Image (cartoon, rainbow, N blue to C red):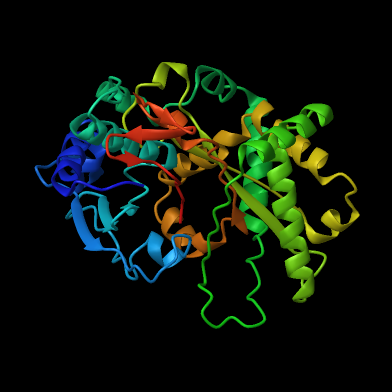
Amino acid sequence: AGPLDESAFREAVRQSVARHPLLQAVVRRRPFRRPVWEATSQQPQVSFEQADSSLHEDETEALRPAELPPLDISAEPGLRLHVSVGAARSTLCCQVHHCCTDGPGMHRFLGDVLAIYGQMTAFDDPPELLPLDPELLRQRDQWPPAAKQAIRSLGYWKEFARAARGYFFRDPTPVAAADDAAGIPAVGSHSCFLDRESVRSLRRFVQQRRLTINDVLASELLRCLQQWQEKRGGTDRQLLRLIIPVDLRSGDRGAMPAANCLHIAFFGFRIRDLRDCDDLAAATNAKVRSLFETFGTTHFDVGLRLAQLVPGLLEWRAPRGTRHGTALLSSLGDPTRYYAARFPRRDGRCVAGSLVLERVAVR
């Protein structure tokens, strides 16, 4: 909310991109060698348009342009910014290639943009920008020390083999189409925002049950998927598999610029098991806890590295890419915790000069 200074915003983007090298780089292929990131002088595209005053602020059309052509990171940086400018409120839509950064990294970049913009437009009490260390980008694909130690054990590889059989030979069920699918996209997404009181209530509940908030969210999503499938002819043997991103940013990587620094974990239930489960949150907690205790969160990454050693294996699996899971659950919490900046607050919201951050959505 607030009036937007276009020239200050463009300069804030330029300075922020300089702090995040992968957002100003392209991928170069090399004969008989792995592709590499190459720095360029290209700036990400930034476009501005006047907001449609007829749209309500909560309408999704106001959150993204009608058409977003795909990003070609061999020809341009993997980031585009589209700003819809209104008299009292503006909306920023970011299109980013997942090879460049994940969600937490994108929030870190957005925090920089807001902080630098705030420093240029604030009359007093400007945001404070914190330092980042580009050298940490070299560690973005490294496993934590405990995981490196576990991978040397026989027990890890037995569990890996079991998980690989389940991954390759038990395809997850896609979400059934709606009864009236007109106008509904084939791949949908939904962002849910919890107010402070809802979060407090959830925390009290999970503390009493010795669960986590993510256990409750995952179990509710699974139950919702089960009911949706059953109403549309789902069978007992259908496998509902969730994809869970796992952030690798530990304390020693806290100053890392925007990057893809995630592992992907999978777990699921067959519909018949969901129907018979009286305490799904506890069952979900047990599965997730087992994933972390056995370092199952590294299985997908290890599998990709091994698959690169077998000619044609990745190409064989790639066409099945839309069937890694039934749904993906990502719980970011408060996105401002990823900001490498300190902001003054107004009613709990970040103040960046002439702007106040109202909401962040992932589409």
Q: Residue at x 66, y 43 (%)?
A: 163
Total numbered labels:
0
**Foreground of the two, 29 or 335:** 335
Q: Is residue 146 visible?
A: yes
Quarter-of-image position of residue 87: bottom left
Please state the horizontal and vertical placement of residue 221, each as a whole percent of the image.
70, 53
Residue 219 placement, left or right of 301: right
Q: Residue at x 64, y 41 (%)?
A: 161
Nearest the eye: 209 or 41:
209
Closest to the observer: 344 or 311?
344
Q: Could you say which quadrant of the image residue 235 lies in? A: bottom right
Percent position of residue 176, x then y: 66, 72
Which residue is depicted at the point 64% across and 67% down? 175
In the rendered image of this protein, does residue 189 appear above or below residue 362?
below
Determine whether, in the image, residue 59 is placed left or right of residue 326: left
| Left or right of 96 in this view: 27 | left
Q: List x then y, in percent, for residue 279.
A: 87, 44
Q: Is residue 234 above or below residue 265?
A: below
| In the foreground, 273 or 207 | 207
164 displayed left or right of 277: left
Seen as rendered, the residue at the extreme left is 41
Place residue 49 in its image quadrant: bottom left
| Residue 104, horizontal then vertical, whole percent | 43, 37
Question: In the rendered image, is residue 94 in sight?
Answer: no
